[in-house]
Image (cartoon, rainbow, N blue to C red):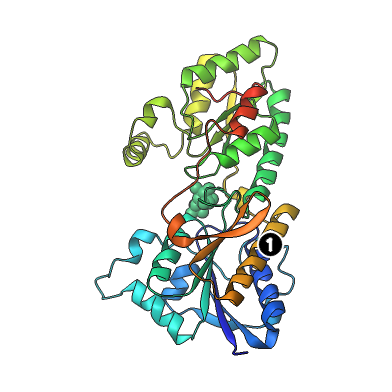
Amino acid sequence: MAKRRIGILTSGGDCPGLNATIRGVVRSCYHLMGADNVEIVGISEGFYGLINNHCKAMNPSDFYGILTRGGTILGTKRTPYKMMQIVEDDDIDKVKQMKQTYNKWELDCLLTLGGNGTHKTANLLSEEGLNIIGLPKTIDNDIWGTDVTFGFHTAVDIGTEVIDRIHTTAHSHSRVMVVEIMGNKAGWLALYTGIAGGSDIVLIPEIPFEPKKVAEIVRMRADDGKPGLVITVAEGAMDKEEALLKRKERAKKRAEAGEVTVTNRIADFVQEEAKIETRAVVPGHMLRGGSPSAYDRILATQFGARAAALVKMGKFGYMVAKKGSDITENKLSDIAGKSRLVDVDGEMVKTARSIGMYFGD
Ligand code: F6P
């Protein structure tokens, strides 16, 4: 069997499970094709590394002990898709350079671990004739074509612990605690952590809220004898007025008001209107730090094993995915440029509403 040279890169924000996925791919490749028939080429800092030829041949020992390790042993960077096709003043054609690196290293294929932006670029490279396999990473869980991405459930666990701990202060001080949860344009992470953490109110981008309604609910709960409560706010949440604006207009308006997200505005408004002391808490990047959960280690291993099987079959231009309990794959061209938001009429929102959770709508 001819030696297969397999490139791997991690791109976009880091998240728990990247190393576990790399390990799953590598171990399965060694198992399926024989360790002597496989060479793994690690590309550091995502597509930036591919553009700039930051690559190295990896040894099996480079992958020892990484199942539990957070972050990515390869390093990562955000290289916006929009920049990819722009040829810069000094004549840098990034697509050409990525192809050059791929060819220079005589890669048989390239595995790209990343989120929506990564898969757009992966599809571009696939259309340029490179053999690409994508693996769905993100704490945001917003990748089209897969029920779940690796990293998401670990972030849910971390977010839930944050909310559990915040409940203590909310109840001791009879305060409203407003917790901001990452998730970019999607509300998955806030919705899941809100449900798991027993939040009273969850605000997500898919369901624009009415600020007065939120304050009314808080007041009503206080009048019912529950003054301490937790509001979970997705970082992408927006009120009904803002929802009428385009993303850029909304960002501009917020920038002019000195805001990035809506969280502090909600906290101030609730304190003012409901007359209850309020605090805002932003766990931020803590949500994607550290070791992956058992769920994510297993998912990462399943995704890695499927990607290795695709390498062996020579089936390229796909992203591995989980649908129901099956591990499968989608064409990169079918998922590139799409994202998966919370279904406002879906099971999870119905469940939340049925236990009396408010969305402020
Ligand atoms: O996509 C993952 C994510 O953590 C989002 O939830 C968040 O909006 C973004 O990345 C933060 O990006 P950065 O690490 O570049 O600040």
Q: Could you say where residue 352 lies in the image, as x and y percent from the top left?
A: 63, 28
Q: With 112 as the anchor, is 130 left or right in this view?
A: left
| Residue 241 found in image quarter | top left
Residue 291 seen in the figure: no
| View extreme (top): residue | 223
Q: Could you say where residue 127 lies in the image, as x and y percent from the top left?
A: 39, 69
| Residue denoted by label 1 | 302
Count of marks, rendered view: 1
Q: Could you say where residue 190 lies in the image, as x and y percent from the top left?
A: 59, 38
What amino acid type is highlighted by mark number 1? Answer: Gln
| View extreme (left): residue | 89
Q: With 112 as the anchor, is 31 left or right in this view?
A: right
**Residue drawn at x 39%, y 37% as measured from the top left:** 258
**Residue drawn at x 31%, y 66% as measured from the top left:** 85
Residue 125 seen in the figure: yes
Tell me if mark 1 has few (under 14), some (14-19) or many (20+) residues whose alpha carbon lies within 10 angstroms of its own: many
**Residue drawn at x 34%, y 59% as measured from the top left:** 82
